[in-house]
Amino acid sequence: MTTPTQAALHLLAVGAFALSLSACTTKMTPNPTDTTSSTTPGAHFTQDGLLKADQKVQAFTAFNFEHLKDEVARGQGEYVTSLGTLLGVPTDRHPEFFTFAREHYPVLFTSDRTTPSETVAALNQELSADPVLGKVLARH
């Protein structure tokens, strides 16, 4: 049988573990405010309070940047698939998008200091200049 003192010590230990786990995960994940902050109220959200399409791409890229770097280099994977979907690439054009992204890796990730927003800007610029994918995305 557990005494009230033992139960209190157990709760204290569980609380301390949860607090230390929270501190660890805070250091490992990007701060959403850094990615989605703006000086213009409502600049990132629709009338319904949802993120605008371009902001979804920014947020997704920021939160999954390391995974995206790896998968873009390989030209396949769930993160690069999701990125293509968020950009509006039709599913039947995903293989072209994967090849495009892999071939443009040096432009998208110019150095170890490249930021997610720089990558998104470079990706948008390269996609708009692409004769095939640029036309496909312009229609969507």
Image: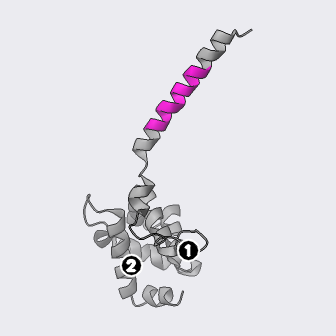
* Type of amino acid at the residue the image marks with label 1: Thr
- The chief SS type of the magenta part is helix
- Residue under the image location 58 percent in, 75 percent down: 47
Lower position in the chain sequence, tag 2 or tag 1: 1
Compared to residue 100, the image places residue 130 above or below, namely: below
Q: Quadrant of the N terminus?
A: top right
The correct choice, above or below, for 29 with respect to 45 in the image is above
10 Å crowding of disc 2: few (<14), some (14-19), many (20+): some
Q: Mark 1 points at which residue?
A: 46
The extreme right residue here reads 1
In percent of width and height, residue 57 lies at: 47, 69
Scheme of image coloration: one colour
7 in the magenta segment: no
Question: Which quadrant of the view contains residue 111?
Answer: bottom left
- Residue range highlighted in magenta: 11-23
In this view, the mark in front (2 or 1): 1
* Mark 2 lies on residue: 124
> Residue 131 sits in which quadrant?
bottom left
Q: In which quarter of the image is the C terminus?
A: bottom right
The amino acid at mark 2 is: Asn
For the point 50% across and 68% down, the residue is 56
Q: What element carries label 2?
A: helix
